[in-house]
Image (cartoon, rainbow, N blue to C red):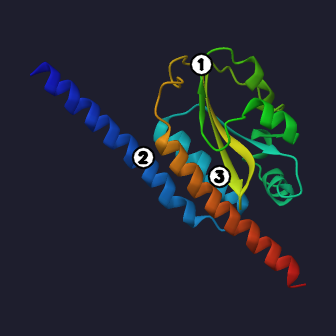
């Protein structure tokens, strides 16, 4: 009976987590622009999961120029942005699009933190995303609780949400490029 209750509790928790991801995912389509996309994402992550630190790391390339410009225009996002060189990003997150969960040896990951804000983090979820087929950065969740994110946790739902962010971001960047071509 005790084992059955534990299994039922785990199933209930997993359903609640999946529902939270689904609510965030479905709200991404409401974004009218790049700024709105990341404001919706960050607000959703903070609200649904009570994550204390959420920020964006973008790779400094021509592909990310409109994204960086949009983020810098947002009062909500400007101090939650770190722009880094492609080589540094690839050195820190060489796993491609697979989310990385860490709670030990965090020093290398501090290079992803925004300069304008100091976060007291003991565990991190680093979630890469792309525009078209090019990885352009990561959205990052941090917590002062060491076991919030651990390497053995499943990342399927994070990966699925990152794919949705990537698709929507690609659409929004394409819309900007089409607007520029119209002139």
Return the residue at label 3.
39
User: How many C-alpha atoms fall within 10 Å of the one at disc 1: few (<14), some, or many (≥20)?
Assistant: many
Q: Residue 68, image x and y in percent?
A: 83, 52
**Quadrant the N terminus occupies:** top left
Q: Secondary structure at mark 3?
A: helix
Q: Secondary structure at mark 1?
A: loop
Q: Residue 110, image x and y in percent?
A: 76, 24
Q: Secondary structure at mark 2?
A: helix
Q: Nearer the viewer, residue 102 or 110?
A: 102
Q: Which mark is residue 103?
A: 1
Name which residue lies at 68% across and 69% down. Answer: 171
How far separated are the C-alphas under marks 1 and 2? 23 Å
Q: Are marks 1 and 3 in contact (CB under 8 Å)?
A: no
**Quadrant the C terminus occupies:** bottom right
Name the outermost residue toward the left.
1
Name which residue lies at 75% across and 71% down. Answer: 174
Which mark sits nearer the N-terminus, 1 or 2? 2
């Amino acid at each position: 009976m005790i084992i059955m209750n534990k299994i039922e509790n785990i199933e209930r928790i997993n359903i609640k987590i999946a529902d939270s991801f689904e609510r965030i995912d479905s709200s991404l389509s409401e974004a009218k622009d790049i700024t709105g996309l990341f404001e919706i994402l960050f607000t959703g992550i903070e609200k649904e999961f009570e994550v204390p630190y959420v920020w964006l790391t973008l790779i400094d390339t021509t592909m990310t120029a409109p994204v960086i410009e949009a983020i810098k225009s947002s009062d909500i996002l400007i101090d939650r942005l770190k722009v880094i060189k492609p080589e540094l990003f690839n050195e820190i997150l060489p796993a491609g699009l697979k989310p990385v969960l860490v709670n030990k040896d965090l020093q290398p990951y501090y290079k992803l933190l925004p300069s304008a804000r100091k976060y007291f983090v003991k565990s991190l979820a680093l979630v890469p995303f792309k525009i078209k087929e090019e990885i352009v950065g990561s959205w990052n969740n941090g917590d002062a609780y060491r076991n919030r994110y651990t390497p053995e946790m499943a990342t399927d739902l994070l990966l699925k949400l990152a794919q949705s962010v990537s698709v929507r971001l690609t659409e929004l960047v394409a819309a900007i490029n089409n607007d520029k071509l119209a002139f």
